[in-house]
C-alpha cells in the first residue's frame, strides 16, 4: 500500500485535500439538511470520478473497476441520504 501511495503522490494528495474540504463543509453546514445531502452527492460523484481517473492513469481501468467505484459511491450517498432524511 505504501508503495502505491509513493508512486501516485499527486493523485492521493488531491484525494486527501478533497476529503479534507468535504469534511470542513460537512462541519460548516451541519445544521442544514439540504446542503448536507447536496454535499454528500458532490462528494460521492467526486470519489467516483477520482477513482476512474486514478485507475485509468495506472492502466488498470476496466468495467468491473468502474462498477466498484460507482457502487461504493452510490452506497455512501444513499447512507448519507437515509440518515439525513430522518
Image (cartoon, rainbow, N blue to C red):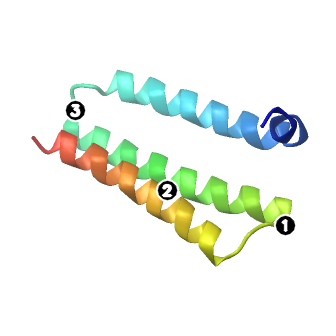
Residue occupying the point 88% across, 34% down: 6
Q: Position of residue 85 (x, y in %)?
A: 14, 45
Q: Which mark is residue 45?
A: 2
**Farthest residue, direction front:** 1
Asked whether the beta carbons under mark 3 and mark 2 sit within 8 Å of each other, the answer is no
State whether residue 64 is above or below residue 11: below
Q: Which residue is mark 3?
A: 32
- Pick whichever of labels 3 and 1 is earlier in the sequence: 3
| 3D distance between C-alphas at marks 2 and 1 | 21 Å
Q: Which mark is residue 59?
A: 1
Relative image position of residue 30 (x, y in whole percent): 28, 25
Distance (Cα) linking label 3 and label 2? 20 Å
- Label pair 3/1, CB-CB below 8 angstroms: no
- Position of the C terminus, as image quadrant, is top left
Q: Residue at x 66, y 62 (%)?
A: 52
Tell whether 26 sits left or right of 15: left
Nearer to us of marks 3 and 1 is: 1
Q: Where, by quadrant of the figure, is residue 69 drawn? A: bottom right
- Relative to 61, say whether 31 is above or below: above
Number of numbered tags placed on the structure image = 3
Q: Position of residue 54 (x, y in %)?
A: 74, 55
Q: Quadrant of residue 59?
A: bottom right
Q: Quadrant of the N terminus?
A: top right
- Establish if 18 lies above or below 23: below
| Badge 3: residue crowd in 10 Å (few <14, some 14–19, many ≥20) | few
Q: What residue is drawn where x is 38% and y is 29%? A: 26
Amino acid at each position: 500500500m505504501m508503495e502505491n501511495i509513493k508512486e501516485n503522490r499527486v493523485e492521493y494528495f488531491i484525494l486527501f485535500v478533497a476529503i479534507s474540504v468535504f469534511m470542513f463543509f460537512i462541519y460548516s453546514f451541519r445544521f442544514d439538511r439540504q446542503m448536507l445531502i447536496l454535499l454528500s452527492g458532490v462528494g460521492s460523484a467526486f470519489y467516483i470520478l477520482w477513482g476512474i481517473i486514478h485507475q485509468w492513469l495506472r492502466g488498470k481501468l476496466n468495467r468491473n473497476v468502474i462498477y466498484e467505484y460507482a457502487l461504493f459511491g452510490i452506497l455512501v450517498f444513499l447512507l448519507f441520504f437515509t440518515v439525513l432524511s430522518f
